Every structure is written in structure tokens, then in C-alpha cells.
Amino acid sequence: MTRFITAILVTATAVTQLLTGCGLQEPTSVSRKPSTPDTSVLYAQRPQPPVEMPFVPKPAPPQAPTKPMPPSYRPIGQQPIFVPVQIPVQIPVQVPVPVQVPVQIPVQVPVQFPVRVPAPPIEPLPPPAPEDLDPQIFDFGGMFGYVEGQFRPNAITGSRCPTGYTEKQILGQYNVDWPLYYCYRPHVQGRAADWDFGGAFGYIEGQAAPNPVTGYAGCPYGFNKTEVYGQTNKDWPLYFCWRPTDGDFDVTAQFGGMWGYVDGQTTGNPGRGTSCPIDYHQVRVFEAVNCDYPVFICVR
């Protein structure tokens, strides 16, 4: 740059001297006829350009340390080189902790439904001596008949009468009424009955007849109620009450027999005809005129 400026200054000086007549003199007279200039004199009087001196650069002054320029202002070739470096970084990670959760596994448990199991047969006792029999007292052994045209077995045994008991028909007429039975045996002095008798009840002329043992149409507390007779729109229902004995002689009621009509004829109470033993009450518990024959029981 310095050399270029020096050359310009030298050239400007030469031109100035030439124009001001430092090297040439303007002629005093002007001739109309052009003359041929003497070029040898012109070139002889032209100043020679100065001799150029070799350029010696000055030593550069020491440069003070400067701050690095931003990457966008740095000269080309001095841009920083970015080298990808893999730096391990530890990132906290939440690891789920196993938790023991109680799991309920469905288990098939066998369900026991109540099933009516017939009572086991009772071993027959030796026949009592005639003098031990009480003709006025009977041991009750249950009843069986038909309900809605289907056989209704004795609830005590699951079939008919227990072993040692006698079955007695008290209702029934061919093609008119279904048959009805009860079970009995003569009572033996000093021997408790196998089942306690809790009375019986049904309907009389379409009205509920009370149980003579309770005074209402129902069984005493703790006794089982069993329907043994009846058909919708044909025969009124009839129930009897019973329970297994606990072995004592403090019974709710004493059974003195039953009777009714079979094929239009009275069946009679065993050994008594159409009457009850002494001190027993004769109670009608079932009847419907022109529909059902009456049924009587003896109780005290």
C-alpha cells in the first residue's frame, strides 16, 4: 500500500512540473504555419522519473493480546473447528420398585344345598306285653297323601310309615278325592314317643280352621309344618305339625287318633269308632260341603 501511494505522488509531481513550464517553454510567437516540433529536444528536456528505492518493510510493532473475536467475525480459515465429543452424562432414572400386591384367586367352593334326607329307619322294638299297652294313647308317626296330584311322602321317613307303625286311610274316593293317610302305633307305658305331635289344621267351608293345639292356623314353636293334601280349585289344603322327640315325657299334646271318610264311608278311630278316647277332644279340622269329606282328630 505504501509503495502504491509513493508512485502516485511521484507521477503527480512530474505532471505538475511539465504543465508549469519547468521542463518546457512556451514559444513567443505563434506561426500560422504549423511547424514540426523537434521531438529530440522535447524528449531531451523531459524530466526523468525518480529512481525507485527498494522497499524495506518496517518491523511490525508488538501486538497486544486481544480478545478472540466472535466466530462470525473471524477471517476465513480461522473459524473454530468443532469436533463431536461424546461426554458421558448421568441422567437420574426412576426404576419402579416391585410391590407385592395381594391377588385374590377365585376358588370354586362346593356349595351345599339343603337336601331333605329321609330319616333313618328305626330299629323295631320288641312287642310290648298286652298289660303295658294304653289303648287310649297312640304314638304319632306322620302323614302322607297327594298335593297337586303328586304323591307327597311322609316328611318323617321320606316314604310312607315308619317301621312298627300302622298306616290308616282317612280320605279318598275313586275319581273324586285323592287318598290321605296317617301313621300310628299303640303307646307303651314308660316309653317316650319317637316324634312329638303338634296338631293339624286345614280349611272348613273355605275358612282356615285353627289348630286345636295352638288355637290358630299354625304350628307350635319349634315344630315342622308339612302340607300333605290339597289341589288348586279342587281340594283345600291340610297340614300337620311334628318334630323329633327329645326323649322326655313333657309333650305338647297327646295324640288320640284320627278318622274321616273313604268312598263315602266313615273309617272310624282305631278301637273307638267315630269317637275319641276318654278325656280327649274331638276336633274337626277339614271339610267342605259337596266338595271334601270331614276329617277329625283326637287330642289332649
Image (tube, helix red, strand yellow):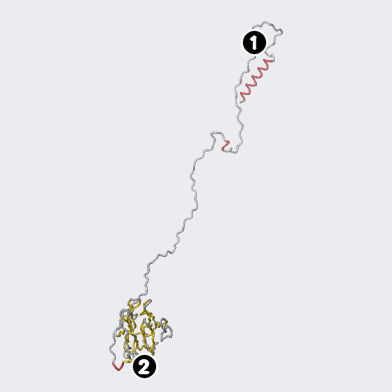
Q: Quadrant of the N terminus?
A: top right
Q: Quadrant of residue 137?
A: bottom left
Q: Position of residue 86 (x, y in %)?
A: 48, 45
Q: Quadrant of residue 101?
A: bottom left
Say what secondary structure mark 2 lies in. loop
How far is mark 2 from mark 1, CA to CA? 194 Å
Q: Position of residue 149 (x, y in %)?
A: 33, 76
Front position in the image: 148 or 175: 175
Say what secondary structure mark 1 lies in. helix
Q: Quadrant of residue 45?
A: top right
List the single residue furthest toward the top.
33
Which residue is the site of mark 2? 278
Residue type marked 2: Ile
213 over 40 or under it: above or below? below
Query: How crowded is the residue under tag 1: few (<14 C-alpha within 10 Å), some, or many (20+)?
Result: few
164 over 86 or under it: above or below? below
List the single residue furthest toward the front.
290
Q: Residue at x 36, y 93 (%)?
A: 278
Horizontal relation, residue 32 to residue 225: left or right: right
Which residue is the site of mark 1? 42
Q: Quadrant of the C terminus?
A: bottom left
Q: Earlier in the sequence, mark 2 or mark 1?
A: 1
List the single residue furthest toward the bottom.
131
Residue type marked 1: Leu
Q: Position of residue 142 (x, y in %)?
A: 34, 83
Q: Position of residue 264 (x, y in %)?
A: 32, 84
Horizontal relation, residue 82 to residue 53: left or right: left
List the single residue furthest toward the right.
28
